[in-house]
Amino acid sequence: MALIYFTSEDLEVDVDEGIALVDVAAEVDCDITFGCKSGSCGTCRVRVVSGMDNLSPAATEERDFLQGFGAHPDERLGCQLKINGDCKIRYVGLDDLED
Ligand code: FES
């Protein structure tokens, strides 16, 4: 089991390790909004407050996408994440993305 803490909602959720964040979000009342679900729109951008090592690693395409928008190194695309252990996540969305 893994514990996800959604900081914006003060919401803790126990999940099975290996589950996709997009599947968790479909089951609980968290603020993360998804668009394409394929890593190309940025709608699902999240900041990993803690537990980055407990998430599936970012593929080159995801890293390139986030870097292209000037995203902070602790940010990920929620639709690309699998949860492998405890983590704290804050939804960012498209706020503050640079063109
Ligand atoms: S939903 Fe579009 S990048 Fe994640």
Image (tube, rainbow, N blue to C red):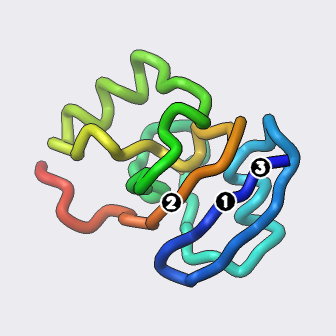
Crowd tier of the residue under label 1, counting other residues whose Cα lies within 10 Å: few below 14, some 14–19, many 20 or above: many
> In percent of the image, x 69 and y 53: which residue is there?
22
Q: CA distance from mark 3 to mark 2?
A: 13 Å
Asked whether the residues under the numbered discs 1 and 3 touch, taking CB atoms below 8 Å apart as contact, a structural biologist would say yes
In the image, is residue 56 above or below residue 52? above
User: Relative to 76, does residue 45 appear above or below in the rendering?
Assistant: below
Q: Position of residue 14 (x, y in %)?
A: 81, 61
Q: Secondary structure at mark 3?
A: strand
Three-letter code for the amino acid on which mark 1 is drawn: Ile
Checking the image for residue 2, the label placed there is: 3
Spot occupied by residue 60 in the image (x, y as percentages of width and height): 40, 16
Task: Name the side, left or right, on which 21 lies relative to 96.
Answer: right
Type of the residue with mark 2: Ile
Q: CA distance from mark 1 to mark 3?
A: 7 Å
The residue that label 2 is drawn on is 89
The amino acid at mark 3 is: Ala
